[in-house]
């Protein structure tokens, strides 16, 4: 049988011949494709090259990615016929610039994977080049939320990868393609039953079975609707940085009678990765089966707030369970969730009429709450575990336990009690400053400080620890396990926390008790004996201890984290204070805690600050 000539190119080949997919992230947050790509007399490629693009992005931002498909079609109607079978997908992946291990590739994680749902909802721009070739451009908009990955960030970048493909035509619309039947005008394969043609038992019947029916087996991974890939831009790589680090801490107020309410401290730290203003628009706390009361009613703390890099803000909220839960629940009160939402606008270029750029960030996470009252609130703190959250994003932490400090003085909580076992255990890990392996340099303000104003101490921290040498002395052999453990311990970076300890107020130790001589002496009760005469020094000490000192200075930095610091590495942090009294003021000490080994040391050689009163 003669083989017919190969037919000409079909419509799919014409559509895919010059098709190309690209994608961009415009600089302006109010990008209008009609104004940027359709208006004007220049070619489409010239208009596309003149669009200003973003060079860096931020985590927790919802960015608009525009996918542009170029194809050679006769008109717009022909393009829309192919759009029904078009599939466009986009992936966003976070990739670190370098890895801690030289033998392993940098860590990466996919944070977004989606596609264009309604492909027919498209913006089409026809264009004609100088040689008369007509092209048609299709533009889609896809919003991508840049969530935070679980990997540790090290100079991260976001990589966008887009793909486009054309599905095969529907068999109902294409009569040449039929499931289960061979196509017409196609040569058949070898007859598998040709050897039975001369069998006398068949009575002259020649059976026929094409080899294509037997040996042609489709791979298991090949789907019925296979795609024909469209070439395009391989990937789009942009720098990405975190704008804000948040942490929520909880503390229970000391009230009589005890209350199940909690005080939530929402701490926000703005990173140094932006050089413009940021507007903190919203902080919302919602408690299921409870209420959240906003305690930030001061004029300077009302939202929205204008913030810059390195700003540190703390917001207070009172969380209370519903009265119905308190009346019906006798045991633990744990069926509550706290939903925290923070919204920020970055004012990169807010006042531009043509290309305004104000990216918006949104952070939302959920954590369970425990309103259960402590068994003995008057003696020590309950030995509870920190509040944990499942699937929490990095840089968004909730701490409890040791970090949850009471809002009142320890002498008020337990005035007549001995130090708790927890405090005795912690004191065992205290070490001296030379053995701690850390050098700290404190620098005070270089300008006058006035009452009611903030001032800053700059702390320069140096990790003086060095990697342990792996050279064994003569006659000593090191095993592989000991070498591995030593190398791991020596190469581990140190994480530190700085806590400011204020001066102890004179009345916190309690007034000295007046000694008496009443009681049983020698088995005889003498009720007429007078009190013992006190020495003048004792009387003076009692009078001096009975006074109440005003607070000199208040630390505005709850705790400052440093690190991780590698060996011989350094870092600079700031401690912010508020001066409340005129004169020479200072603090008792600065406690430095190693979060890895739980060792701590008190630094008492600190600068003094002279506070003046404005005239």
Image (cartoon, rainbow, N blue to C red):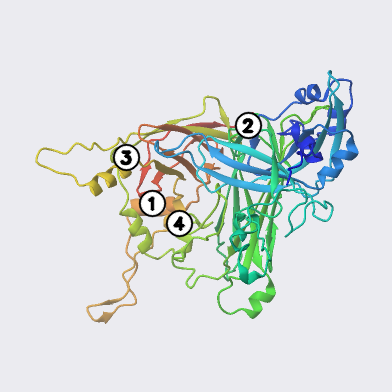
Q: Which residue is mark 3?
A: 433
Q: Which residue is mark 4?
A: 402
Find residue 427 and report its image quarter: bottom left
Q: CA distance from mark 4 to mark 1?
A: 35 Å
Q: CA distance from mark 1 to mark 2?
A: 55 Å
Residue depicted at x 59% and y 53%: 265
Q: Position of residue 519 (x, y in %)?
A: 31, 76
Q: CA distance from mark 2 to mark 3?
A: 36 Å
Q: Position of residue 102 (x, y in %)?
A: 40, 35
**Mark 4 and mark 3 in contact (Cβ < 8 Å)?**
no
Give the mark, 1 or 2, whose residue is nearer the N terminus: 2
Q: Is residue 29 visible?
A: no
Q: Which residue is mark 2?
A: 274
Depth order, front residue of 600/143: 143
Depth order, front residue of 73/199: 199
Q: CA distance from mark 1 to mark 3?
A: 33 Å
Residue depicted at x 68% and y 40%: 162
């Amino acid at each position: 049988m003669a083989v017919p000539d190969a037919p000409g190119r079909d419509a799919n080949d014409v559509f895919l011949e010059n098709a190309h997919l690209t994608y961009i992230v415009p600089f302006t947050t109010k990008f209008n494709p009609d104004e940027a790509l359709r208006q004007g007399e220049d070619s489409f490629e010239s208009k596309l090259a003149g669009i200003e693009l973003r060079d860096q992005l931020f985590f927790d931002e919802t960015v608009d990615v525009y996918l542009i498909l170029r194809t050679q079609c006769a008109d717009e109607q022909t393009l829309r016929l192919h759009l029904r079978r078009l599939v466009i997908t986009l992936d966003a992946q976070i990739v670190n610039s370098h890895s801690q291990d030289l033998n392993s590739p940098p860590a990466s994680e996919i944070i977004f994977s989606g596609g264009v749902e309604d492909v027919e909802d498209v913006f089409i721009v026809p264009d004609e080049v100088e040689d008369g070739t007509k092209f048609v451009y299709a533009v889609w908009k896809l919003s991508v939320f840049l969530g935070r990955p679980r990997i540790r960030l090290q100079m991260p970048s976001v990589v966008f990868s887009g793909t486009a493909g054309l599905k095969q035509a529907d068999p109902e619309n294409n009569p040449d393609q039929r499931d289960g039947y061979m196509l017409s005008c196609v040569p058949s394969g070898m007859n598998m039953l040709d050897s039975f043609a001369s069998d006398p038992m068949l009575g002259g019947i020649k059976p026929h079975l094409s080899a294509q029916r037997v040996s042609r087996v489709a791979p298991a991974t090949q789907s019925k609707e296979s795609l024909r890939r469209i070439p395009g831009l391989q990937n789009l790589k942009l720098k990405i940085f975190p704008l804000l680090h948040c942490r929520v801490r909880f503390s229970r107020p000391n009230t009589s009678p005890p209350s199940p309410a909690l005080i939530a401290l929402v701490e926000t730290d703005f990173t140094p990765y932006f050089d413009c203003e940021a507007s903190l628009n919203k902080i919302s706390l919602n408690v299921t089966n409870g209420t959240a009361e906003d305690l930030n009613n001061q004029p300077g703390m009302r939202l929205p707030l204008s913030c810059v890099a390195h700003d540190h803000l703390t917001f207070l909220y009172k969380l209370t369970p519903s009265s119905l839960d308190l009346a019906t629940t006798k045991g633990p009160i744990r069926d509550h969730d706290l939903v925290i939402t923070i919204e920020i606008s970055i004012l990169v270029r807010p006042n531009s009429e043509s290309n305004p750029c104000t990216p918006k960030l949104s952070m939302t996470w959920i954590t369970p709450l425990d309103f259960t009252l402590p068994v003995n609130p008057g003696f020590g703190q309950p030995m509870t575990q920190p509040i944990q959250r499942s699937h929490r994003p990095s840089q968004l932490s909730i701490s409890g336990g040791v970090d949850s400090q009471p809002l009142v003085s320890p002498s008020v909580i337990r005035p007549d009690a001995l130090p708790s076992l927890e405090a005795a255990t912690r004191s065992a890990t205290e070490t001296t400053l030379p053995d701690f392996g850390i050098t700290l340099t404190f620098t005070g303000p270089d300008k006058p400080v006035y009452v009611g104003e903030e001032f800053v101490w700059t702390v320069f921290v140096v990790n003086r620890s060095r990697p342990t040498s792996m050279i064994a002395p003569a006659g000593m052999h090191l095993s592989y396990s000991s070498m591995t453990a030593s190398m791991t311990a020596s190469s581990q970076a140190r994480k530190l926390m700085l806590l400011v300890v204020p001066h102890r107020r004179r009345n916190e130790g309690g007034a000295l008790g007046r000694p008496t001589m009443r009681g049983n002496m020698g088995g005889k009760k003498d009720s007429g004996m007078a009190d013992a005469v006190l020495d003048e020094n004792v009387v003076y000490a009692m009078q001096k201890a009975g006074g109440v000192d005003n607070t000199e200075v208040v630390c505005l930095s709850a705790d400052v984290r440093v690190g991780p610091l590698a060996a011989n590495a350094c870092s600079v942090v700031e401690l912010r204070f508020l001066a409340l009294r005129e004169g020479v003021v200072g603090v008792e000490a600065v406690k430095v805690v190693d979060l890895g080994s739980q060792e701590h040391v008190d630094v008492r050689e600190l600068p003094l600050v002279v506070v003046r009163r404005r005239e």
